[in-house]
Image (tube, grey):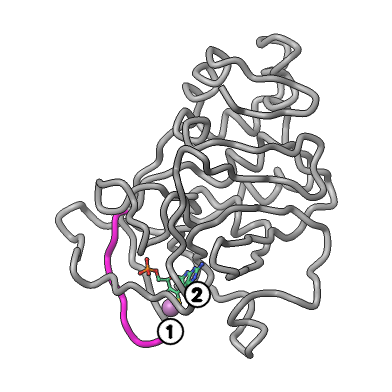
Amino acid sequence: MSLILPKHTLSRRRLLQLSGLSGVGLLLNGCGSSFFSDSVGPIFEPLNQSLEALLLTPKPVPEFPISAIEPDNLLVNTFDFTPQIDPVQFRLTIDGEVNNPMQLSMADIQKLPLTSMVIRHVCVEGWAAIVQWGGVRLKDLVALVQPKSNVRYVYFKSADNYYESWDIASAVHPQTLMAYQKNGQALSADNGAPLRLASPIKLGYKQSKWVTQITLVSNLLPIKGYWEDKGYEWFGGL
Ligand SMILES: Nc1nc2c(c(=O)[nH]1)N[C@H]1C(S)=C(S)[C@@H](COP(=O)(O)O)O[C@H]1N2
Ligand SMILES: [Mo]
């Protein structure tokens, strides 16, 4: 498999073991490293003290039943062009102030636990839609790369030159996903395939499509986001 880890290598079996654990267990189970072999031990250790405190307090946003999905209401909102990305060639880079930077294929990502949620997507241009998103919790990806304790922000780079930045607490919220499914089907190119952000706690413009790189940092740069740098509010909370 093509999971690339500079220091540690996850076998397919280890990834499957990992996928059987709940997200909370993955991050907070401090005795995990004695249970698993040394090669995967680090990913079962706590993220770190300061990030754990954030994980204990997130408020879950109420979700909708499947019957509430509004399949026609999610308008495609793309400002530049729609990148056509080969899902087999695609690699998601996760780097920055982390101990284990990684490049993950879609096959790697799809071995991690799948979370599905029905939430409202809200665009500041005046429309909203109830959508089902399926994907991997961003916090599970963050745990894999072992962020350093000073990490406070996350940058997202997209294949259409769009870019975004989020606070770490919102990024590791249990309902913040890197989604590869919409309304029960594989994500389309228009909606951000192969991988996009989806979260009920942020406005539409924060939810980058075609994400190719996730970078964890301790400080925000002067460049914050495609719309933020044109005057939109940075936090973009819902
Ligand atoms: N890379 C990228 N991500 C993006 C955009 C974009 O133009 N490029 N548009 C944003 C806006 S304003 C919204 S409302 C949603 C729309 O998602 P959709 O096109 O899947 O409905 O994507 C967001 N993410
Ligand atoms: Mo939007």
Q: Which residues are magenta?
A: 124-132
Question: How many residues crowd mark 2 within 10 Å: few (<14), some (14–19), many (20+)?
Answer: many
**Amino acid type at image mark 1:** Val
Q: For disc 1, does the CB lie below 8 Å from ligand 2?
A: yes
**Amino acid type at image mark 2:** Tyr
Residue that numbered label 2 is attached to: 205
The image's mark for residue 197 is: none
Element type at marker 2? helix
Q: Tell me the residue at 45%/72% (across/down).
A: 81
Residue 98 percent location from the top left of the image: 79, 42
Element type at marker 1? loop
Q: For disc 2, does the CB lie below 8 Å from ligand 1?
A: yes
Q: Tell me the residue at 60%/29% (across/down).
A: 26
Magenta-highlighted stretch: main secondary structure? strand
Labelled pair 1, 2 in contact (Cβ < 8 Å): yes
- The picture quadrant for ligand 2 comes to bottom left
Where residue 87 sits, quadrant-wise, is top left
The image's mark for residue 124 is: 1
